[in-house]
Image: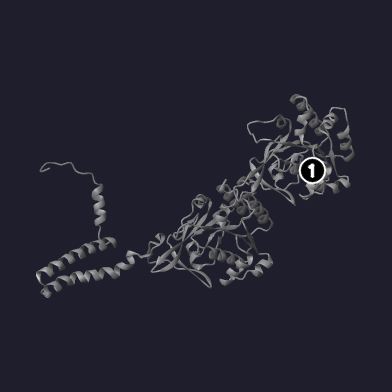
Amino acid sequence: MNLGKDLMPTGIPGLDHLLGGGLVRGNSLLVEGPPGSGKTTVALRTLYEGAMQFGEPGLILTFEEFPRQIYEEALAFGMDLAALEKQGRLRVVWTPPERILQGFTGKSDLVENIVRELGVRRLVIDSITHFKRVAHAETDLRETLAEILNFLKLNGITALLVKELERMDDATIAFEEYLVDASLRVYNARSGHGGDNERFIEVRKTRGQAHVSGLHPFELGEEGVVVYPRLRPEDVRRNAAPPIARRQRVPFGVEGLDAMLGGGFWEGSFNLAAGYQGTGKTVLAYHFIDEGLRRGECCRMVVFGRRPEDLLREAASLGFAWEGSISEGRLCVDTSTRSGLSMEKLLGALDAGLHADPPQRFVLESLDDLFALPGWERSAADGVQVLRALLADVGATALLLHRAQGLAGDLMDAAREIGEFTDGILQFSLAENEGRLCRFISVRKHAGSDHAKELRELAIGPGGMQVAAAGGRHRGILTGQLQLAPAEVAPEVLPRIQSVRELFPDLLAAAGLPEELRRRVLAARRELALADVVLQETFGRTRFTELANRRQEEPNPEPTGGRR
């Protein structure tokens, strides 16, 4: 992203991605934010990683806290500054801000002496907000700060200036932002998920280098600072997928379903299986994984809310033994809870995992758990596109499960938006038939391939899933109420009606019934005749409805005379 530039990595995971590899060496960086947002910790971590990873000595100038306080607070985030100071790789100096200002105006050589003594390459000033209380005017402060930055740049020192913000005002830009080469702003906001606070970091400016804009979550912990970039599809490394003509089919190992798909989904495709709870989506995912393992492929499953042992027990009940594949490293099962997880954190972990051990088959259970994570409400479509790009980059064939609404398996609103990014959609449905629930499956979408258009009944037993052959006798499946199709029952119903109709006049004549009873029988016959017409129409033996509709569509003729 910033080829040919002498970049200084910050050493903070994720932040260097936002900066395109790091800061231009010798440039100045403003780190600003409200109290408790993590701005000082971000600056200290950059200095600490410089000394630890890259052999670049650092200097911390603090105007408020004494070195002992700095050591204790940094240690809570995994930074042993005192040890580095003993090794001569870092120095923490408390001093009044007036002395620093004098040092850069020729009245004191405090900073210059330390810079020469340690060979300082990174410097933190915490915080430049204190300069305002000792400067006579903003113009004086601006000139003095410019002198400080020029001195540091000439000496090849990367400066990190910490600044406190009393209010987050994007409309007002302070003069410090004009003076520095780069600017970071950190935020601390309510996440809306459990009332927890969520931290964000934003690269507002990088002079002379490209960067990734926008707000990105980050965390502070014992391991230090971790930034989770909000990946975009264009940020993902992409390997071009081969044309469909050269791609292989990826079967499920379910004979009837593979026939419906013309042999299976395309290799490297991104697919969705949607259906109501209990329709068989998870069982299908198990078949998908097991068939891959049977073919010697590497597979990966990401499952929310279940323990690995429970998942393996379910698979074993269907005849799938996966313990050996896990120990061989051919099957990776990630089980997660949504607690503490965000869209950016999940995608970042997937990015690392997929490239460390690329799978050929990938299952996610479920898409609905993703939608519930913080971050997805901001842009679910972008998140799914990034997920698709990550999987496409390693050539994995993906199957995502979705708990649809209703027995028919209709996609939820969020998933309906995602459907346009998928290559294939399998729809699972439930319908009641004489007090028994029946399962059905259909291929709703299969890009670049012919496929079966009908719904087929499926059954699940100890051996897994079986999908029936074509030629079902039912209609009304998507309404949840099964009915025999007219073409199926017509041979049974119509001949009986015809025989009764032919026999009726003879029976009536031979019966010798009284007049009143004869009238009642004739009325019943008229009702039967009407029912006959309806049945004939239903079974396609007559065209009364078609003729009536056509008659209604014809314009009324103008009257030509006669009675009105």
Q: Position of residue 290 (x, y in %)?
A: 59, 67
> Residue, x 63% and y 34% (percent of image)?
170
Camera-side residue of 59 and 61: 61
Q: Position of residue 37 (x, y in %)?
A: 70, 42
Q: Is residue 486 left or right of residue 460?
A: left
* Secondary-structure class at tag 1: helix
Which residue corresponds to mark 1?
47
Which quarter of the figure is the N terminus placed in? top right
Q: Position of residue 186 (x, y in %)?
A: 68, 41
Q: Position of residue 43 (x, y in %)?
A: 76, 42
Mark 1 belongs to which amino acid? Leu
Visible in this render: residue 450? no
Camera-side residue of 126 and 488: 126
> Residue, x 25% and y 60% (percent of image)?
542
Q: Is residue 347 left or right of residue 452?
A: right
Which quarter of the figure is the C terminus placed in? top left
Q: Identify the image quadrant of residue 108.
A: top right
- Colouring convention used in this rendered image of the protein: one colour
Camera-side residue of 73 and 423: 73
Visible in this render: residue 119? yes
Q: Identify the image quadrant of residue 116.
A: top right
Classify 205 as above or below 471. above
> Residue, x 66% and y 35% (percent of image)?
167
Camera-side residue of 282 and 493: 282
Q: Identify the image quadrant of residue 102.
A: top right
